[in-house]
Image: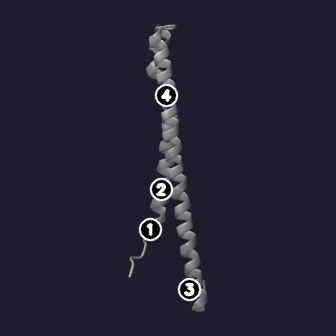
Amino acid sequence: MSDVMKADLDAIRALAGKQHTSATTIRGLDVGKAFRATISGLAGSDVAAVCARAEASVESALAEVAARVDALAAANRAAADTVGLADDTYAAGIRATLNMEP
């Protein structure tokens, strides 16, 4: 016999909300701030060029992380909705079978 799955749908939805907020925070990070002074102070130099590439790489990596965290949030919201709907449908089926009022 297998275990019965128990899920706290409100907790899953809250987690999804926190994940979405985290993704928004990640997108709001100002990566350029760390590189701006060096790039402008050494404009035209190899160091400035390397810093510009590093800035672009870090921004790209953070955008990917934010997208993945948002995907986790969406998956958690969808899972909570699916489990909740299945539970409601199952309960309604049982009530109908037993001729119970909704």
- Which residue: 39% across, 78% down? 2
Q: Name the residue under label 3.
A: 94
- Which residue: 53% across, 43% down? 67
Marked residue nearer the N-terminal end (2 or 4): 2
- Which residue: 47% across, 13% down? 48
Q: Position of residue 13 (x, y in %)?
A: 50, 58
- Badge 3: how crowded within 10 Å, few (<14), some, or many (20+)? few
Are the residues flagged by discs 1 and 2 in contact, CB closer than 8 Å? Answer: no
Are the residues flagged by discs 2 and 3 in contact, CB closer than 8 Å? Answer: no
Q: Where is residue 7 in the image (x, y as percent from the top left)?
A: 44, 68
The one nearer the camera, 8 or 2, is 2
Instruction: State whether residue 91 is above or below residue 51.
Output: below
Measure the alpha-carbon separation of dots 3 and 4: 55 Å
Task: Identify the coloring.
Answer: one colour
Q: Name the residue under label 1.
A: 7
| Of the two numbered discs 1 and 2 in the rendering, the one whose residue sits closer to the viewer | 1
Instruction: State whether residue 65 is above or below residue 40.
Output: below
Q: In which quarter of the image is the C terminus?
A: bottom right
